[in-house]
Every structure is written in structure tokens, then in C-alpha cells.
Image: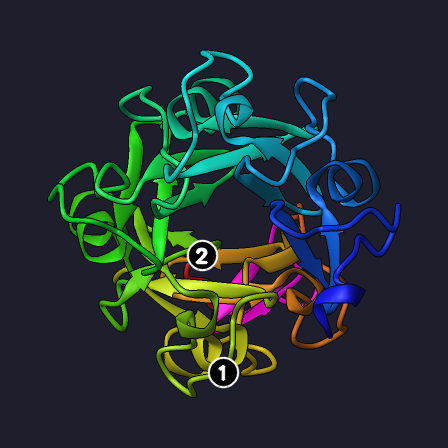
Amino acid sequence: MTTAQFYCQYCTASLLGKKYVLKDDSPYCVTCYDRVFSNYCEECKKPIESDSKDLCYKDRHWHEGCFKCTKCNHSLVEKPFAAKDERLLCTECYSNECSSKCFHCKRTIMPGSRKMEFKGNYWHETCFVCENCRQPIGTKPLISKESGNFCVPCFEKEFAHYCNFCKKVITSGGITFCDQLWHKECFLCSGCRKDLCEEQFMSRDDYPFCVDCYNHLYANKCVACSKPISGLTGAKFICFQDSQWHSECFNCGKCSVSLVGKGFLTQNKEIFCQKCGSGMDSDI
């Protein structure tokens, strides 16, 4: 570009001996440059002229003196800040207005600091601790009670119930038998190890047994049919001296008439109605 050609690209005025601004390798006088290319300040709405510093954030522009917190009016130049609903706020104002409060200490959780969330509440990382050992829980498993949050080891030590069979913690559900607790999967027949969770069972010396094992091992046997006598489902039986009968088996040994509620005679552990037993030597 020769001296004769050195003029403003917009108004064509000569720039010899004058201040000018280059834009895309073309010269402009200061007045034209400011009028054509200057950005407008978000705060004062005036152009940010070429002799002023232009501060930009997300395609928005401010004069250096206008770049302030919209709440406390302190300068944000070369300071951390945050945006809320297109407003610029210093970190302190942003924290007071927008940041979560710690559920434990009730203080603001500052932007950029790590916070823990649990059941809709927030904690400082250093405040989110086990209620018993006071150690930070962080992202480790926890169990919550009305009295606070507990790490798993402390909860098991202070509150957990233990299975009477495997001695491990029962975290949910379980079965109570003889004032003792069992995991459902541990509540088994003491004889055949059958699952008793949804089965009828009998007890012997505080040990559970399925009906079959109990009948085989402990139940009295009917004198007539030799089958076990079980008290389940309201079954009735007759007991005389050291002998037992199912109610339906308590019949005369000769004519088979039922003797339930009737007088009878015995001979050599057999029972007879009074008619059939007449003439026999009786034990009664």
C-alpha cells in the first residue's frame, strides 16, 4: 500500500498522521472502526471502543469497568465467577444464592467443591461420615437409620441380627423360630436339610424338622397301623397307658367297630368292644 493509497476503508478519509485500526488487513480510522465494528456492553449498552478493553463471555461483551457481580457489584476482572439466569455472580454470591447447603453443618457447599448426595440431601464430603466411627463414607456402601448413616461394618456391629445357623448378618427378611433368627435359605430341616421356608415343620429340642423326618425320628407310632401319629392339621389321637392310636384306628380288634368315646377292654395290647371282649380276662 502506497502513501497515496493510505486511507480509511470505510469513509475514504486519509489516514496520514492519524491513528487507525487494522481489520482483516484493511485500515480504518478510529471513528469508523468504533461505529462499524465495536461490540456493545451488556451492562451500559454503550459501544466498547477501540481504546477500551473488551471482556467477552459466551458471545456477550462488557467494558472492563462494567464487568461486575450483579448482586454485590464487585469487579469480576481476573476473578472466578458463575452465571445464573444470564446474570454474572461472584463465587460468594453464587454460593449464597444458588449452591446447596450441607445437610450436616448447614453451610454452603461452594461451587467446584465435591459434594455427596443421598436421599435428596447434600453433604460436604468431609461431613458425610459414619455416625458411629466418624470416618468418611464417600462412595462406599452405607445403611441409613433414623439416627444417621452408618458404614456397613459399624451397622453390623451395632444393629444387625445374625443368622442362628450361618452366623452371618441378616440384612433383610429372615425367619424367627424359638426366639432365634435365620436367613430364609438357612432355615432347613435338621435331618434331611430340606428347605422349610414355606413348609410345615415340627420342633425337637429347639431344632426344626420337616414332618417326614420328625415322624420318622420322634413321632409316636399308632399301635394299630404302625404309622406316625402327628398333631398337624388338628389330627386327633387316643392315648391309653403307654400306647397311642390314630382316632380312626381306635377300633375293636375283632369286629372293627370304632371305640372312640366308648368303653373298651384290653388284652395283650389289643382292644375290644365290651361285647367282643366278654368272657375274656380284662385288664380293667
Furthest-bottom residue in this view: 192
Amino acid type of the residue tagged 1 in the rendering? Lys
Furthest-top residue in this view: 72
Mark 2 crowdedness (10 Å alpha carbons): few <14, some 14-19, many ≥20: some
Amino acid type of the residue tagged 2 in the rendering? Gly
Q: What residue is at 21 percent from the left and 42 percent from the top?
A: 126
Residue 194 bears which disc, if any? 1
Residue 147: horizontal and vertical position, in percent? 29, 27
Q: Label 1: state its secondary structure.
A: loop
Position of residue 200 in the picture relative to residue 141 (left or right): right
Residue 143: horizontal and vertical position, in percent? 36, 48
Magenta stretch prevailing secondary structure: loop
Residue 19: horizontal and vertical position, in percent? 60, 45
Can residue 259 be seen from the camera position used here?
no
Magenta-colored stretch includes residue 268:
yes
Q: What residue is at 73 percent from the left and 73 percent from the top?
A: 2
Q: Which residue is mark 2?
A: 174
Q: Nearer the viewer, residue 1 or 180?
A: 1
Tell me where the magenta segment starts and ends, as one range. Answer: 263-280
Q: Nearer the viewer, residue 236 or 245?
A: 236
